[in-house]
Amino acid sequence: MIVPAIDRAIDVPLPIVCAFVGAIGAVIGSFLNVVIHRVPLEQSIVFPSSTCPHCKNSIKPYDNIPILSWLILRGKCRACSAPISIRYPAVELLTAVTFFLVYWRTDLTPILPVYLAFAAAMIALIFIDAEHMILPNVITYPLLVLALAVRIVFPLVFAQNFFSDTLHWPATYLAGQPAWLVSLFGAIVGALAGGGSLWLVGVIWKRLRGVDAMGLGDVKMMLGVGALLGWRLAFLAIFLGAFSGAVIGLAIVTKQKDKDLQAQIPFGIFLGTGSILALLFGEQLVAWYLGTFVR
Ligand SMILES: [Zn+2]
């Protein structure tokens, strides 16, 4: 992302901004919990309202306050005392923190809601992959459509350029062309870099080893990530994902001594984490890397 100037249009005290953005993030996190629980089961995310999976009692609004309710109830259902997974407050807290970081990096700019939606989709995909080992099409397809739409519409509506990859090769070949065309070209290159490269690795791996290295869900997810963030940040997200995945994977391997582990690690967790990190700090990481190692 291109980080805007630090001069803020309105001077609201930081703690108030933190509390406000964090509260919105916690509420969205609460919604993401519903998405994470119901989308893999192909249930509606709107109806019915939340119930305790153990006793089926509906959860009262005052017991459905993000993070706080879980703490007050000490992780137990009010009706039947069945334990409530710590995943619920964890997702709410993580979304709150992520939303604040996205706001902090992006400020009140038109791209802010897009990046918040992107981060929310990544969090949902991370936790669904962790639990069910799938990255549902109902999230990855709309993500790609949103990315392409934003890349076309934003240059038409706003004078400011929000997409840093349009300033770099190969988009520079299109210098002088309409901004939306350069942006769309960057999105396609980014999608190919993100999803296409993973797909290629999977094909080569299958030829060499005869096993599926990764699912198509990972490819579809990274098509959308690449389309929105561009090829540089898409590669960075894959690098960060592969690196963290390898580190955590090795830790588990040495602990479990399980040779069939490859099939057990949901790579989407790491790709999603890498994508959020690339969104937040990618430009700075790439600049630091180029300044340090490429002179
Ligand atoms: Zn219950």
Image (cartoon, helix red, strand yellow):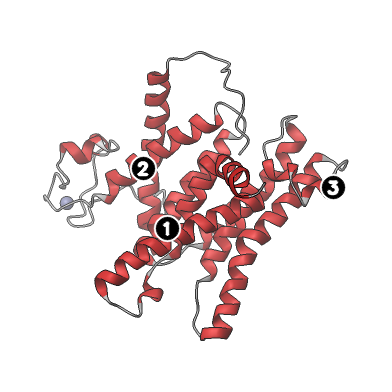
Q: Which residue is mark 1?
A: 244
Q: Report the label total.
A: 3
- Residue identified by numbered label 3: 174
3D distance between C-alphas at marks 3 and 1: 35 Å
The local crowd at label 1, few if under 14, some if 14 to 19, many if 20 or more residues have their Cα within 10 Å, is some
- The residue closer to the viewer here, 83 or 202, is 202
The amino acid pointed to by label 1 is Ser
Image coordinates for residue 109, horizontal then vertical, percent: 60, 28
Q: Which mark is residue 142?
A: none
Residue type highlighted by circle 3? Leu
Q: Position of residue 119 (x, y in %)?
A: 49, 45
CA gap, disc 2 to disc 1? 18 Å
Q: Which residue is under mark 2?
A: 94
Report the residue at 43% width, 49% height from top. Answer: 123
Q: Position of residue 231 (x, y in %)?
A: 66, 53
User: Which residue occupies 77% across, 52% down?
Assistant: 170
Badge 2 amino acid: Leu
